[in-house]
Amino acid sequence: MDDEFFRFPHTPHIAWLGDREPRGDKLLPPLEVESFLSSELVVEEKVDGANVGLSIDQYGKLRAQNRGAWIDKGVGGQFKHLWKWIKQYEYQLKLALDSDLILFGEWCYAEHSIGYEKLPNWFIGFDLYSRSESKFYSVKRRNEVLATVGIPIVSPLNQGRFSLKDLKLMLDQPSYYGANKIEGIYLRKDKGNWLEKRAKLVRADFTQIIDEHWSRKSLIPNKIQY
């Protein structure tokens, strides 16, 4: 198995709702948007946390990553409770992931731009990546695997074919996790056992504060609903 670091890929916007054009974020070209919206899509809540990947190394040990770097044990800040949390799921994760899969999810201990009052867990899973196939699992397949681990899966919002207007209306609903509004939505198109394409749509007021990085503020923990 190739043990090379795999960084979670950028998710393009299906439309940009902010006033200023995105700098680092990519927009789907109009023709791709048209094709994408003609397909059956799964819509999920976009959660405002830290992107964390969990996998098994060549020695059979669990490891964690955030964007382009490994997360060391003993690290502080928003990850100070991560390894204690991982320990609770170590056995189940090793069985489910084996040497092939990377579980990606949002680590939601620290409030970023949105505060959550009703989290089911500090970690919410949203993707499984197969290193041997270089593909992400479909929603159905992902859900089946995560059900064996006992880790919450990101909240589903809808499924079907939608216009851009339909998708924009979905941004006005409250978060499943206890915030007044959702940050945005993820759109997934699956084919068989695999994810074929994905995109996102982010609220206009959220795009305006993307550059005001949360880490400049004091750390405020989100809340778990037990």
Image (spheres, grey):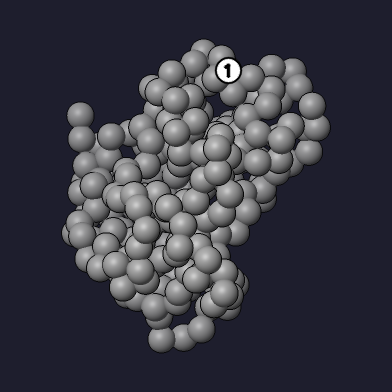
Which one is nearer the viewer's eye here, 138 or 61?
Answer: 138
The image shows residue 40 at horizontal and vertical percentages of 43, 53
Amino acid type assigned to the residue bearing label 1 in the image:
Lys
Identity of the residue drawn at 40% across and 49% down: 42
The image shows residue 191 at horizontal and vertical percentages of 55, 43
Q: Is residue 4 left or right of residue 179?
A: right
Q: Which residue is mark 1?
A: 94
Instruction: Look at the image and tell me whether residue 69 can be seen.
Output: yes
Query: To which quarter of the image does residue 173 belong?
Result: bottom left
Q: Is residue 159 left or right of residue 62?
A: left
Instruction: Look at the image and tell me whether residue 84 can be seen.
Output: no
Query: To which quarter of the image does residue 64 belong?
Result: top right
Q: Is residue 87 above or below residue 9?
A: above
Identity of the residue drawn at 51% across and 45% down: 190
Which one is nearer the viewer's eye here, 12 or 138?
Answer: 138
For numbered disc 1, what is the local secondary structure?
Answer: helix
How packed mark 1 is, by other alpha carbons closer than 10 Å (few <14, some 14-19, many 20 or more), is: some
Q: Is residue 166 above or below residue 176?
A: below
Furthest residue toward bottom: 19
Identity of the residue drawn at 29% across and 49% down: 157
Identity of the residue drawn at 28% across and 34% down: 120
Rendered-image quadrant of the C terminus: top left
The image shows residue 31 at horizontal and vertical percentages of 57, 74
The image shows residue 23 at horizontal and vertical percentages of 57, 78
Tell me how many marks there are: 1
Rendered-image quadrant of the N terminus: top right
Q: Is residue 149 above or below residue 211?
A: above
Which one is nearer the viewer's eye here, 126 or 108?
Answer: 126
